[in-house]
Image (cartoon, coloured by chain):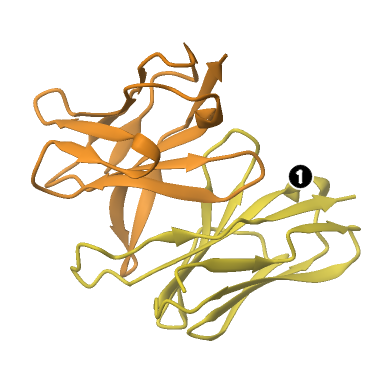
Chain colours: A orange, B yellow
Amino acid sequence: AQSVAQPEDQVKVAEGNPLTVKCTYSVSGNPYLFWYVQYPNRGLQFLLKYITGDNLVKGSYGFEAEFNKSQTSFHLKKPSALVSDSALYFCAVRTESGGSYIPTFGRGTSLIVHP
Amino acid sequence: DTEVTQTPKHLVMGMTNKKSLKCEQHMGHRAMYWYKQKAKKPPELMFVYSYEKLSINESVPSRFSPECPNSSLLNLHLHALQPEDSALYLCASSQPATGAVNYGYTFGSGTRLTVV
């Protein structure tokens, strides 16, 4: 079964500092990995994906993620955090079921960026 | 148009009411999904429609009844709900699993449902 794990419930960082939100995966075959962000009372917004190719993936709002096959990780990063980055972040892996591709989500990590 | 539109944004209903949630997309996606999300938890898959046919029902109680009238519309009919059904209901759409890499999974902003 495909799965992802987000080991941290919450990450706190000061504005202007680099941030990392961790994700590890367990898949059979090639992993298709995603990061989504959810602001309060909103749907999930797509940030970035890894399908194949470069291990460093660049996404929306200055976020990037590094795919590491040996460590089975796909950590989300940003060089300089903003207060407006405070939100709930979900890592996901693509799973095929019933003729559809469905994201299997991690439990989510709440990112708090303080001034 | 690259959006999934959900209406209403907020809904308060009594346990004896009947109401419907609506989801619409015009991206040509042929798979549509309903999710239920509790606060600070990941979305839980409820139903999947592929080419307007129900392909996955994740053991959802019968008080939730999905409907896909055409390739752009997805409804969720609600009847005799319980307070524990209060949650954010999200719709999403994508291309079905055709082997295409960029299948464009897109979420709507959700309907915040409160059952009183």
Q: Nearer the viewer, residue B46 or B6?
A: B6
Neighbour tally class for label 1: few under 14, some 14-19, many 20 plus, Cα within 10 Å:
few
In what element is the residue under mark 1?
helix
Q: Amino acid at mark 1?
A: Glu
Q: Residue A91: x percent and y percent?
A: 37, 37
Determine which residue is flagged by label 1: B84
Q: Residue at x 56, y 36 (%)?
A: B41
Residue A102 vertical placement versus A22 (above, below)? below
Total number of numbered labels?
Answer: 1
Q: Nearer the viewer, residue B116 or A63?
A: A63
Q: Residue A41: x percent and y percent?
A: 67, 44
Q: Residue B53: x percent and y percent?
A: 46, 81
The image quarter containing residue B35 is: bottom right
Q: Nearer the viewer, residue B97 or B109?
A: B109
Q: Residue A35: x percent and y percent?
A: 36, 41
The image quarter containing residue B103 is: bottom left
Q: Residue at x 18, y 44 (%)?
A: A31
Q: Is residue B107 left or right of residue B51?
A: right
Q: Residue at x 84, y 71 (%)?
A: B18
Q: Residue at x 35, y 36 (%)?
A: A62
The image quarter containing residue A48 is: top left
Question: What residue occupies the far bottom of the structure in this picture?
Answer: B70
Chain for disc number 1: B
Q: Is residue A24 left or right of residue B107?
A: left
Residue A41 vertical placement versus B89 (above, below)? above
